[in-house]
Amino acid sequence: MKKILLISDTHSYLEPKLIKHINEADEVWHAGDIGDIKICVEIEKLKPFKAVYGNIDDAGIRVTYPENLIFNCEDVTVLITHIGGYPGKYPARIKELLLENRPKLFICGHSHILKVMYDKDLQLLHVNPGACGTHGFHKVKTVVRFEINKNEIKNLAVIELGNRTDLN
């Protein structure tokens, strides 16, 4: 069993309240718009870390992290990208990736809108953890925590880290 902390859209800000949740996880996954590679370095000191780059990320981050990440966690195929849309509204590039790889879990960021939806057509769970940075229009900083046990995704919880304008 793996305990996953899913974050996105840090935009160069590592929320201090996030450290407690990082320490409770087995792995941290970042769905892009990291902003500053120092965020990754700090998280990697604490836990195994996977990430994709987002549209605001510079060349240094783009060389270090891919646009799309496809892997297995336990017996669950996972696809992470930054700009992914949502069920019924996937961009053509994403729809092709989903059909080709058939993930059970599809993760994206970008919109700053927390969204957890089951896509009946593609038989996958779509998760966007919202944003945990201070840039953007979101009102509350959010991340998502869940567990993967063999082929099950369970105990999913939304964690609110305070208002976007709160700096700690």
Image (spheres, rainbow, N blue to C red):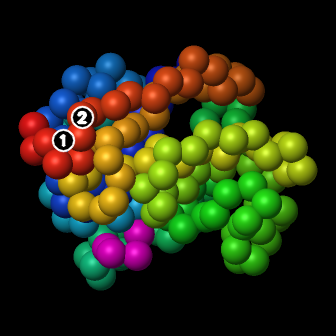
Residue 80, position as x, y percentages in the image:
56, 55
Rendered-image quadrant of the C terminus: top left
Q: Amino acid at mark 1?
A: Glu
- Quarter location, residue 142: top left
Residue 165 part of the magenta segment: no
Taking the image as drawn, is residue 113 in sight?
yes
Taking the image as drawn, is residue 31 in sight?
no
Is tag 1's residue or tag 2's residue first in the polypeptide sequence? 1
Q: Which residue is mark 2?
A: 162
Nearer-the-camera pick, 112 or 73 = 112
State if disc 2 and disc 1 touch (CB < 8 Å). yes
Judged from this view, the residue extending furthest toward the bottom is 59
Instruction: Give residue 15's mark.
Output: 1
Residue 101, position as x, y percentages in the image:
78, 58
Q: Is residue 25 above or below residue 164?
A: above
* Residue lying at 17% horizontally and 48% vertically, measured from the top left: 165
